[in-house]
Amino acid sequence: MSKLHLVFGGRVSDPQTLDFVDPAGLEVVGVFPDYATAEKAWRAAAQRTVDDAEMKFVVVHLHRLLEPTLD
């Protein structure tokens, strides 16, 4: 199985949490085949919004959700 990674983000109510203000309006950057590619996409998305402290992008390890015993 591929080790898929999802990169998404949006506005959070508190920059120290992952409490997204509008979950329906999250920006999905994409699904990537490995962590290195996902991290590159995450950095690009985060850099676009670096001046907005309430915007947060994250990398989710989809393979860990789909197959928790894989790692």
Image (cartoon, rainbow, N blue to C red):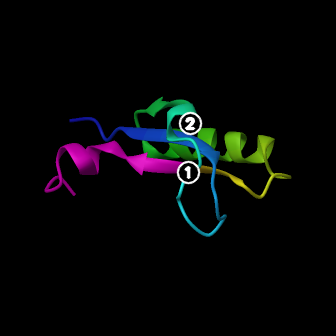
Q: Name the residue under label 1.
A: 20
Judging depth in this view, the residue of 21 and 34 nearest the camera is 21
Residue 6, located in which quarter of the rendered image? top left
Please tell me which residue lies in front, 5 or 26. 26
Quadrant of the frame with the C terminus: bottom left
- Total labels: the figure holds 2
Mark closest to the chain's N terminus, 2 or 1: 1
Q: What residue type is labelled 2?
A: Leu
Q: Quadrant of residue 14?
A: bottom right
Which numbered marker is on residue 26?
2
SS under mark 2: loop
Residue 60 appears in view: yes
Pointer 2 with pointer 1, Cβ within 8 A: yes
Bounds of the magenta segment: 58-71
In the picture, measured across the screen, residue 26 lies left or right of residue 49, that is left
Q: Position of residue 1 (x, y in %)?
A: 20, 35
* Residue at (63% x, 54% y) in the render: 12
